[in-house]
Image (spheres, helix red, strand yellow):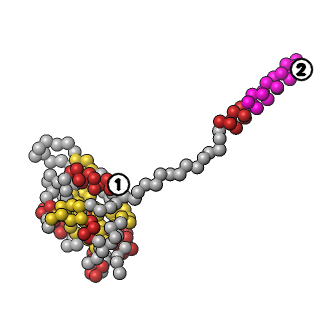
Amino acid sequence: MFRQFVLSVSLIVLVIVAAWTTMHWVMAPEQEVAAPQLLPPGGDFTVLTADGPLSLSDLQGEVVVLYFGYAYCPDVCPTDLSVMRLALNGLEQPEQEKVRGLFVSVDPDRDTPESLGEFAGYFHDRMIGATHSVDELKRITRQYAAGFIIDPHEPGENYTVSHTASTYVIDPRGELRETLSHASDPAALTAAIRRYLPN
């Protein structure tokens, strides 16, 4: 009986030692792996306005408040463009002259540069309306970690466009500095604009 007990204990000890040795060799110390450095979103692009092509770089020296949407948007876009209007109105007149709102439509089949000029101007006289081809709009929105999907439809049918509903604040050098979510507080957008106004 005693011999069986000793044998059992020895066997248990051997199993524990073997397990510890295996863990010691297999589970090597965790190595620190550097995370890939992602380029910040943003950058220059060109859109089509009622006055012709416009590049973001053409607006250097001004703070640009960028929004992707479409004029037929039933609720999301009007809400965010109203936020932009209130934010711009929260600035003093000399400050407003250093800011441009840029509404880029991702629905070029229905929104023309001319109609977008009127649409954007309805919200504020410092706002520009623009668009481009679908392929170019996809490239531009990707630069800003945004996107859109035009819902399938038959010619002539009404349709909606699913799109990112963020507002982007770009400094006078053309660098994206802040991204605000849908239906943000206008005062928060005003404050964000003021942080990057040129002297």
Of 121 and 143, the residue lying toward us? 143
Residue labelled with disc 2:
2
Indicate the secondary structure of the residue bearing disc 2.
Answer: helix
x and y, in percent, of residue 67 in the image? 28, 61
Which residue is drawn at the image coordinates 72% and 34% (left, top)?
21
Residue 185's tag is: none
Residue 145's tag is: 1
x and y, in percent, of residue 86 in the image? 28, 71
The N terminus sits in image quarter: top right
x and y, in percent, of residue 145 in the image? 35, 54
Asked if labels 1 and 2 touch by Cβ distance under 8 angstroms, the answer is no
Which residue is drawn at the image coordinates 23% and 53% (left, top)?
136
Amino acid type of the residue tagged 2 in the rendering: Phe
Q: Is residue 4 left or right of residue 45?
A: right
Amino acid type of the residue tagged 1 in the rendering: Ala
Considering only vertical position in the picture, is 193 above or below 4?
below
Q: Which residues are magenta?
A: 1-18
Q: What crowding class fits label 2: few (fewer than 14 Cα within 10 Å), some (14-19), or many (20 or more)?
A: few
Q: Is residue 129 left or right of residue 11?
A: left
Which of label 2 and label 1 is nearer to you? 1
Residue 199 visible within the image? yes
Q: Is residue 167 left or right of residue 78?
A: right
x and y, in percent, of residue 164 in the image? 31, 54
Considering only vertical position in the picture, is 72 above or below 149?
below
The alpha-carbon separation of the residues under discs 2 and 1 comes to: 72 Å
The C terminus sits in image quarter: bottom left
Counting labels gives 2
Considering only vertical position in the picture, is 1 above or below 175?
above
